[in-house]
Image (cartoon, helix red, strand yellow):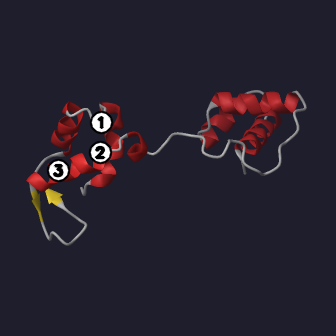
Amino acid sequence: MNESQTRWILGREALLRGRGGLKEVHELTGVSRTTILKGMKDIAGNKPLKPSSGVRKTGGGRKDFEYNNPGFEAALEKIMDENTAGDPMCPLRWTQKSTQVIAIVLYINNLAQFSEIPFLRRYWAH
């Protein structure tokens, strides 16, 4: 299902449930109330349901972290080389530096923002 189909189905379900249907569908699915409300408006306005093809343009959406930060991996390698343990031939590497220290070093070198730190977690083992 694409986005418009999901919205349409949730809106339909909310309308069928009557008063309080929006809240109930929101609580059951976790989908935003505005999304469900938009689906309800689509149905009320007799907006046709689109076919199953993609809704968004090809290439749309947020770019990968590495695309926006081309020097990131080299900087991370440099930080990790200073203080690593384990087999150098194995891709899994261990460091004595905490994730916070690594994040601060990257931030100081203008290679990462604090809002991007969750993306960094995939680069180190826990």
Label 1 crowding class (10 Å Cα cut-off): few <14, some 14-19, many 20+? many
Residue 18 appears in the figure: no
Which of the two discs, 1 and 2, labels the residue nearer the N terminus?
2
* Disc on the earlier residue, 3 or 2: 2
Per the model, the C-alpha gap separating discs 1 and 2 is: 8 Å
Q: Are marks 1 and 3 in contact (CB under 8 Å)?
A: no
Q: Which residue is drawn at the image coordinates 45% and 45% (left, top)?
A: 64
Residue 80 in percent (x, y) is at 16, 53
SS at badge 3: helix
Q: Secondary structure at mark 2?
A: helix
If the image is split into quadrants, where does the C terminus sit?
bottom left
Which residue is disc 3 drawn over?
78
| Residue for badge 1 | 112
Gap between marks 1 and 3, in whole Å? 15 Å
> Mark 3 Cα within 10 Å, few/some/many (few <14, many 20+)?
few
Look at mark 2 in the image and give the residue it sits on. 72
Which residue sits at x=19%, y=31%?
A: 108
Q: Please, what secondary structure does the residue beneath circle 1 have?
A: loop
Three-letter code for the amino acid on which mark 2 is drawn: Phe
In the figure, is residue 69 to the left or right of 42? left
> Which residue sits at x=15%, y=69%?
88
